[in-house]
Image: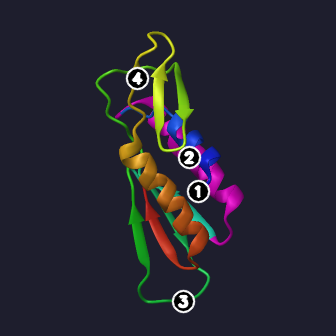
Amino acid sequence: MNISLYKTLLSYRSYSKSKEQIVFRNFLIEYITRNYINVECNVDEYGNLYVEKKTTEQEYVNCVVAHLDINQKTKSNNISIIVSEQHIIGLDENTGLQIGLGHDDKAGVYFALQALKRFDNIKVFF
């Protein structure tokens, strides 16, 4: 696992319907176009990011879906990400309390990026 990439994804505090969600989407577009070949990124009228990687013509291809937003009761943009052997947790630097990082689908975003690396023909929808 590329823990550095995963920590980068977790560092984006992309709360639902926020400008940070757009910033995170734009980071992904830049990351994907810089690190993968044969990819096309498109954003639809709702702000969804659609990525297609094709190296050969195929009638059917796999599609991975992940969401970019996080939903946390406590919101903080001042966090530290702590990695131990078995756990990755967030700490609110203002209060010192543990805070959610949005693992629920930042893991899905990480998986989608790994699938783009692994497969020649794939679609990803964020």
Query: In 3D space, how far apart are the residues under numbered discs 1 and 2 (Cα atoms)?
Result: 8 Å
Three-letter amino acid code at disc 4?
Gln
The image quadrant where one finds the N terminus is bottom right
Q: Which residue is mark 4?
A: 98
Residue type highlighted by circle 2: Tyr
The answer to whether the residues at label 2 and label 4 have Cβ atoms under 8 Å apart is no
The three-letter amino acid code for the residue at tag 3 is Glu
Visible in this render: residue 38? yes
- What kind of residue is marked 1? Met
How many residues crowd mark 3 within 10 Å: few (<14), some (14–19), many (20+)?
few
Residue that label 1 marks: 1
Q: Would residue 25 appear left or right of 75 to someone viewing this image?
A: right
Instruction: Tell which circle, 2 or 3, labels the residue nearer the N-terminal end.
Output: 2
**Residue at 43% across, 34% down:** 101
Q: Which residues are magenta?
A: 16-38
Please tell me whether residue 73 is drawn above or below residue 84 in the rendered image: above
State yes or no: discs 1 and 2 in contact (Cβ < 8 Å).
yes
Residue closer to the observer: 38 or 3: 3
* Residues marked 2 and 3 touching at CB (< 8 Å): no
Give the spatial CA distance, label 2 vs label 4.
18 Å
Q: Horizontally, is 125 left or right of 71 in the view?
A: right
At 44% from the left and 46% from the top, the residue drawn is: 106
Q: Which residue is mark 3?
A: 57
In magenta segment, residue 40? no
Q: Earlier in the sequence, mark 1 or mark 3?
A: 1
Q: Residue 125 location in percent, x, y?
A: 42, 60
Residue extending farthest left:
73
Residue that badge 2 annotates: 6
